Amino acid sequence: MSQTDKSVAIINACAPFSQANAKDSLDVALIFGSYEQTVSLYFQADGVYQLIAEQQPESIQQKDFLKTFAALEFYDIDNIYICKNSLEQRNLPAKFCIDNVQVLDRDEFGMSLLQHQTILRF
Amino acid sequence: MSTLHLVRTSAFQTNDFEQCLNVIQSNDTIVLLDDGCYNLNHDLWQQALDKIVISALYIVAAHAQARAISVDDREVSSLSLEALMSLICETEKSVTWQ
Amino acid sequence: MHVGNFVKKLAFVITTPPSSNLTATAINMITAAIKSNLNVIGVFFYQSGVLNGSEHLALPNDEYQAHLEWQKIHSDFDLPLHLCATAAEKHGLTDDINDQKMTNINNAFTLSGLGELVELNVNADHLIQL
């Protein structure tokens, strides 16, 4: 598998449980990571809910896929960005279930996101 | 390096278009297609007009027509699907808001 | 269409089901691309997009037959159609029903791992999500 300098950004825009988007997105992130492609994760709108601390998915018979976030580190996916405005709109403190989350304001978030060559959104 | 934004949902229904406008850069392009065509008549369209030069704002003609949306070419340019594919090729990358 | 001496290679990711008009748009865009002599190297179906590969879809006759249109694009233009295997399973699509190698996936579609998406991204100049 040849290296490429094409970097991938994945925007997470959905809350974790009602739809499969959060998990589907993570599967895509991990596959790119496992092929040693550069991938960065962006969380905006309701997607920010995926990262907040102290969620208890087992209360609703959901697998704790949030533990899968730990796999991100294994594949060197450590560019993880969250939109400050989305957090503030939802009255969320910057307390996350994983480390390495960088809080960006609206301008920084957009500029960072649009540097990447391939952008997917779930 | 500019980005083409494919907007496929109505801002009256979801906040995809709002999220698009939050990240968009001034040299980017917006294409309204599918239910994104309804955004022409949403308050947020003014933000698009403020941020992006009019020659970089597009709507897919057939999709607007299907929805009885009349297109004012002072606010947006109409595209056929072939022209859309050309436009996609001319831009380095795209992000889809759906 | 040439940009300089160079024909752009496009790949698509489809996440919308056959019943959605969004899928008709995707098919029309891909067809327009191919007819403009753009090089469409493949389509990857993910999430409910995998339903487009179902062999036994029965949409009302007067409605857009998305699944048939995909089959036509595949046969007319040899366009590779990759169904994400894990997503396919989640949607009840399999090429090994009851372990007897029976399939409910149309043969225009190839079951592929998620790695195919990575390949398409590497090989295409532009990966478009629809």
Image: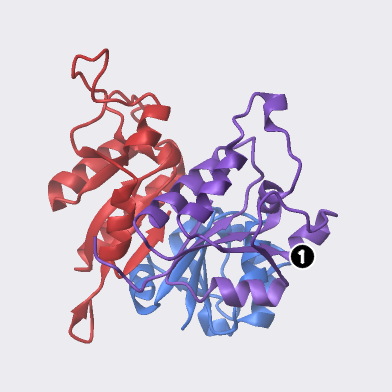
For the point 18% across and 19% down, the residue is: C101
Chain letter corresponding to the colour blue: B
Which of A36/C118 is in front? A36
Give the residue drawn at x 36%, y 61%.
Answer: A36
Report the residue at 61% width, 34% height from top.
Answer: A64
Q: Is residue A81 left or right of residue A25?
A: right
In the rendered structure, the residue with mark 1 lies on which chain? Answer: A
Please tell me which residue lies in front, C75 or C13: C13
On the image, the x and y values in percent for residue B39 come to 64, 62
The red one among the chains is C
Above/below status of A50 relative to A115: above
* Residue B65 x/y as whole percent: 50, 58
Please tell me in which quadrant of the rendered image residue A54 appears.
top right
Residue B42: quadrant of the picture: bottom right
Image hue for chain A: purple
Question: In the current view of this chain or complex, which residue is farthest to the front?
Answer: A74
Q: Residue most toward the right?
A: A91
User: Disc 1 marks which residue?
Assistant: A85
Q: Is residue B13 visible?
A: no
Q: Position of residue B61 (x, y in %)?
A: 46, 64
Q: In terms of depth relative to the viewer, which is nearer, B44 or B16?
A: B16
Residue B12 sits above or below residue A110 on the image: above
Q: Position of residue C32 (x, y in %)?
A: 28, 61
